[in-house]
Amino acid sequence: MTPRIYLDHAATTPVRPEVEAFMQPFHRTRFGNASSLHEEGRLAREAIEDARLRVARALGAGGDEVVFTSGGTEADNLALFGVAWSPRAKSRHVVTTTIEHHAVLNTVSALREDGFETRFVPVDRGGRVRFDELEAALRPDTAIVSVMWANNEVGAIQPIAEIGALCRDRGVLFHTDAVQAFGKVAIDFRSLPVDLLSVSAHKIGGPKGAGALVARRSLKLRPMLFGGQHEFGRRAGTENVAAIAGFGCAAESCAREVAEHSAHLASLGRAFVDALRAAVPGVHVHSPDEGVALGIVNVAFEGAAGEAIVLQLDRLGIATSPGSACTSTVENSKPSHVLVAMGVPAHEARGSVRFSFGSENSAGEIPRTVSAVKQAVERLRGVSRVG
Ligand code: PLP
């Protein structure tokens, strides 16, 4: 049987072998509750504190700045709700961008329903936030600015240090969703003007069900989950010890390999785009160059719907994602908010597919992928012409 080719690493990644082995004991022998006083509990506590140091080191943060969560979504929610609803916060204004992940967009919308004023700053055609508009959006009563580091649909990278410096200058807290950046770009929390940063284990070869919000020590965050005094009183609930331990192991590996991994992704992304352009007419690449270099290649194929292509590719043994949500035909699908924000025409946005590369992909997989794309697109164009 021909092996499948997995090109959906922006959705999730396979667990690294060393992570799987590392997690094994926590299901059976080291299963204790980290709050218990006995040996089983102490061993679980040790595992969590060890993971905390590994994640902190991988991100250039202090151990006491890492709050473990269930993943990136919870980290984003905790950053925004935690700051906005902090007892000392008097500010009622929140700023973000139009291309954030829904974990941020919908949280900001929820804050608006709670009475906050919100501002969604636009981006340019390359998916870069309009700095002048961001600057103009800041007010003396802005509670927090949230701008993602790397976009999950097109890979656009934001100038995080510059945005952070602007926020610091204006005395506004700055959060960045670094879920897609972690492992692909070097992150040094300590030296960045960033107050809060979200990461997720399953995007870096760790398990699902763990993530972290890195938050400056001095920050007063209102928890979203109340209960025991877990996670420095910032997030109550018995810790998912196995997943947290696996996250620590994955974070350490990915920080060690970041230079090598990003070079690998850049070479695959660029080779794929060149091969695709050479083989298939009517291709529009939406990812900016730096997105392609992160291994996130978002492309539209004239006359073929994104989801239909994804389904055809799946049959041909290749896993990808539609660039738009809930699509069935080009006409009915809902165009991606990211592509629309970048000024991509709706019909083109609907035809888009995201290919996202990872460490286990190789250049040898590109020719088969390109020929499958060509076959799928030609078939769909034929069907729509007949129809
Ligand atoms: N933020 C970004 C940029 C993402 O890509 C994702 C996942 O797709 C999330 C947040 C949510 O992370 P999680 O799946 O760990 O909840």
Image: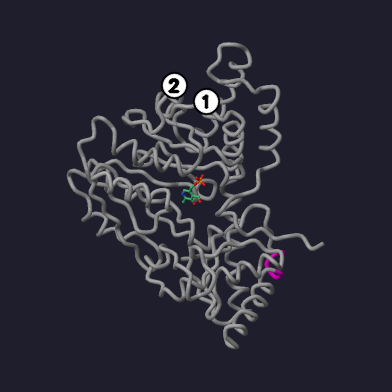
Q: Earlier in the sequence, mark 2 or mark 1?
A: 2
| Circle 1: element type | loop
Residue at the far bottom in the pictured view: 386
Residue in the foreground of this view, choosing between 7 and 109: 109
Tell whether position 52 is magenta. Answer: no
Instruction: Give the Cα separation between the discs numbered 2 and 1.
Output: 8 Å
Q: Which residues are magenta?
A: 364-368
User: For the C terminus, which image quadrant?
Assistant: bottom right
Is mark 2 in CB contact (under 8 Å) with mark 1?
Answer: yes
Residue, disc 2: 228
Q: How is the image coloured?
A: one colour
User: Is most of the magenta stretch helix, strand or loop?
Assistant: helix
Q: Secondary structure at mark 2?
A: loop
Residue 258 falls left or right of residue 147:
right
Name the one closer to the observer, 185 or 348: 348
In the image, the residue with mark 1 has its CB under 8 Å from the nearest atom of ligand 1: no
Horizontal side of 357 relative to 144 (left or right) equals right
Residue 271, x across and y down, in percent: 61, 68
Q: Quadrant of residue 40?
A: top right
Side (left or right) of 3 relative to 123: right
Circle 1: residue type: Thr
Please name the residue shown 56% across and 53% down the image: 11
Which class describes the residues within 10 Å of circle 1: few (<14), some (14-19), or many (20+)? some
Would you say residue 366 sits in the magenta stretch? Answer: yes
Q: Residue at x 42, y 39 (%)?
A: 189
Q: Residue furthest top?
A: 38
Q: Which mark is residue 238?
A: 1
Q: Amino acid at mark 2?
A: Gly
Q: Quadrant of the N terminus?
A: bottom right
Q: Nearer the viewer, residue 335 or 26?
A: 335
Residue at figure coordinates x 61%, y 68% from the top left? 272
